[in-house]
Image (tube, helix red, strand yellow):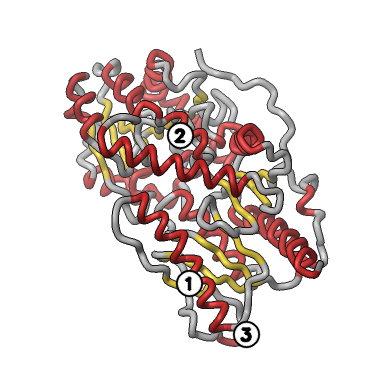
Amino acid sequence: MFYKPLEKQVVLTNLELNRSPSRRICARSCESKVRIAVISPFVDRQHGTERAVAELIDRLSNQHHDEIDLYAQQASDLSTEGPSQTAENDRRAIYWHRVETFPGPHLSQFLGWLLLNRLARKRNERVSKTKPDIVFSPGINAFDADVILVHVVFHRVAELQNWRVGLGLRGLHRWLYYSLLCSLEKKIYGSPRVTLAAVSPHTARQLARYFHRQDVAVIPNGVDSDYFSPAAIEPMRASGRKDFNCSANDFVLLLIGNDWRNKGLPALLAAAAQCRDLSIRLLVVGKDDHAPFVALAAKLKILDRLQFVSPVADVRTLYAAADLLVAPSLEDSFNLPVLEAMSCALPVIVSPHAGISHWLKHDHDCLLLKNPEDVTELVAAIRLLATDAGKRGEISANALQTTKKFSWDAHATELRALLVSAAENKALREKL
């Protein structure tokens, strides 16, 4: 009933320590310091991509002593300097250049962001009379990024959004937004001068499929195993369950992410309705339109078991309150909450369409679904983990071992090697 993946194709990642080509690139030059312009609308440690950027630039600055010019509308959970400040004792720093927010709907905000971050960079280069060695972006944030770490391929997401087209102004706006993103992906990702990396082999295959890029490095996300650990969340459990109105007898299912249809919420609601004999409670975390899912839950007569939660400052409180993370997503380049939950010894149910599944093994460190839209299969997985404490413990213990293969230090080291190599190639091109 559950999916056991076939033998996976060979993909070089930073988990295969000495075999990755980027570890052999310019070993001597990697010792030199690099000035990196990082372009990301938001940077924090509360969300997936934003957390990944924060963990990366923190290490580039503090461990590799690179100088970071961060262009962002908001930056938190980081030690940053203002653009006019000078780092003490010649230490490297993260200089935050605040980019203004463009008003209006999401489409106009994004167009404004592309323009305003470019103007902010030009202004800083004019004032400081210096240019970065390399421009880095986590996704489509600029026309002129040299290195891009791809966290999501919008060509694939747009394919899954077809159901929304024609649903009034909201549907039209979403269609225009995704059309713009797909056009930018085609232009930017299709350029051989742009160095691409992906957070999983799943995403690398999509970049090959849509943009014929066969030269994509795979650099998975990491996890802070001290911050996300059983010892860290255990003291939070009682207060967390109280905050989210969960009783001692509730078996709490957690789903995290935006775009809940893509995250598999319809299937999860249908599965919960078939587990009505169990004391199931659902915590759904993220940002999306509640209305269609409230209507579906009411139709399934499980509205009293469903709670929507806005993103919280410390996501560990959610892992502490939950008994099981369920991630039956239709598409996920990586799905960082799965890795974080596993590091907290929280058992997980995972979709094969999530990039993290490449490194997981069914019935060992997770339950890996064959088809995330198969409600019968999802019900069986939930029932097994809700009723078998021994199985939960076995999977959680194995998950802890799996997460030891992932670290933000390795992520930063591997990506920095790619940045240094790209900076050298860029310098050579500019001399010609």
**Residue that carries the numbered disc 1 in the rendered image:** 120
Whether residue 391 can be seen here? yes
Q: Residue 201 appears at what percent x and percent y?
A: 64, 36
- Residue type at mark 2 is Ala
Whether residue 225 can be seen here? no
**Residue that carries the numbered disc 3 in the rendered image:** 90
- Residue type at mark 3 is Asp
- State the SS at label 3: helix
- State the SS at label 2: helix
Q: Earlier in the sequence, mark 2 or mark 3?
A: 3
Q: Nearer the viewer, residue 4 or 38?
A: 38
Q: Position of 221 compared to 262: left or right?
A: right
Q: Earlier in the sequence, mark 1 or mark 2?
A: 1
Q: Alpha-carbon neighbours of circle 3 within 10 Å: few (<14), some, or many (≥20)? A: few
The residue that appears at 33% across and 19% down in the rendered structure is 271
- State the SS at label 1: helix
Q: CA distance from mark 2 to mark 3?
A: 46 Å
**Residue that carries the numbered disc 2 in the rendered image:** 158
- Residue type at mark 1 is Ala
Question: Height in image: 89 above or below 78?
Answer: below
- Quarter of the rendering containing residue 45: bottom left
The residue that appears at 65% across and 65% down in the rendered structure is 134
Q: Residue 229 appears at what percent x and percent y?
A: 47, 48
Q: State how many labels appear.
A: 3
Q: CA distance from mark 1 to mark 3?
A: 25 Å
Dot in front, 2 or 3: 2
